Amino acid sequence: MAEWTEAARAALAQGPAALVTILATEGSAPRGAGTRMVVTVDALHGTIGGGALEWRMTEQARAILALPPGSWRVQDYPLGPLLGQCCGGRVRLLVERLGPDCGWIGDLESGKEVVARLETGSINRSTFPGEGRGPVTTGPMLGPGLRRGSIVARGALPEEGTAFLEPIETPGTPLILFGAGHVGRAIADRMPGLPLHLAWFDSREDAANYPGVMQAEEAEMVDCAGTAPADAAILIVTHDHALDYRLTAAALAGNAGYVGLIGSATKRARFLSRLSNEGIDASRLTCPIGLPGVTGKEPAVIAIAALAQILSLARHAA
């Protein structure tokens, strides 16, 4: 949390500043609820996931700088149809011009629950003594029913009179999963409850028949692999070896911290030879995937071993 809070204070000391907050997401989204980005006339601090979404929200944040402090608006974005991003989920965001009274930022830093109420031309914030779990729409009276996470990414927009607990980004590793076959499904099925944020893609037309999968063109998937952030883990388990190679090459040429490829020792050797011939450093490639010593070719075993490996790496990185 410290990065955006410090950036907000520093920006306000220099001039007008806006804050973009992800309130809720649905499906595959680049960042989770509670992610924030500080925007000034000529600078950005933090990221809400990059791409067209970040560009559009930066534009809106700079427009709100011309309005009085406290001005706000809530925006919804279906990432695929409207912005053409391959992640394809939905995001609900709050953009506001920060005012001089930002003591609530310190309250968040100290671990307090902060209640925000949307009012005409301002956002009224105060601390809440109870245990909170989320933003929530509520009536005029604030009560112990406030829960973090109950604002959703579709339906009626929060409006004047809505109160919610300020969302806090849940720590977790972004996991970009390519492939919705038996192994891909086994991995996704075991994701709930883990500190991982899943974005899941397959190029086949029937991919979206399985909950959580986003059908995408192969070129979009390759671009996604090549532009993944440094804190992301990539797992490549598609139905097509040629596509596996394109995704692997793109991921290794990019910044992803973990690049895992399902395959045998023979497949690994062939890929390494091709990558070397193309001048691509394959030192970050993990193939086969999974914790060493966990054997078995059953999809469930592969899934558990691969997820455990990613969790182990994330823990050591922290």
Image: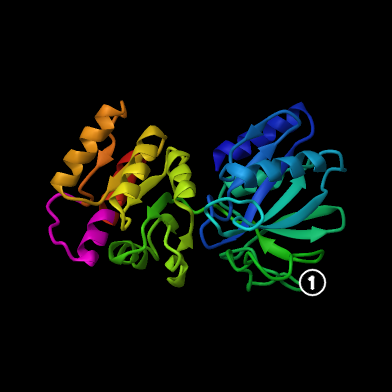
Secondary structure beneath dot 1 equals loop
Q: Position of residue 86 (x, y in %)?
A: 53, 52
Residue placed most toward the observer, 253 or 296:
253
Locate residue 154: give its quadrant. Answer: bottom right
Q: Look at the image and give the residue range highlighted in magenta.
A: 291-306
- Using the rendered image of the protein, determine whether residue 262 is visible from the camera's viewpoint: yes
Q: Is residue 298 above or below residue 7?
A: below
Residue placed most toward the observer, 19 or 258:
258
Q: Is residue 26 above or below residue 55?
A: below
Q: Residue drawn 47% across and 42% down?
A: 223
Residue placed most toward the observer, 247 or 303:
247
Q: Residue drawn 61% across and 49% down?
A: 108
Q: Position of residue 290 (x, y in %)?
A: 22, 52
Left or right of 262 on screen, residue 218: right
- Image quadrant holding the N terminus, namely top right
- Image quadrant holding the C terminus, namely top left
Q: Position of residue 171 (x, y in %)?
A: 46, 50
Please name the amino acid that badge 1 sits on: Pro
Locate residue 225: give its quadrant. Answer: top left
Q: Residue drawn 63% across and 69% down?
A: 146
Decide whether residue 164 is among the magenta residues: no
Left or right of 239 on screen, residue 146: right
Q: Is residue 286 above or below residue 157?
A: above
Report which residue position mark 1 lands on: 140
Locate residue 130: give its quadrant. Answer: bottom right
Left or right of 123 on screen, residue 132: left
The colouring scheme, among rainbow, by chain, secondary structure or one colour, is rainbow
Mark 1 is surrounded, within 10 Å at the Cα level, by few (under 14), some (14 to 19) or many (20 or more) other residues, namely few
Q: Position of residue 256 (x, y in %)?
A: 39, 39
- Using the rendered image of the protein, determine whether residue 315 is visible from the camera's viewpoint: no
Left or right of 53 on screen, residue 280: left
Q: Is residue 222 above or below residue 187?
A: above
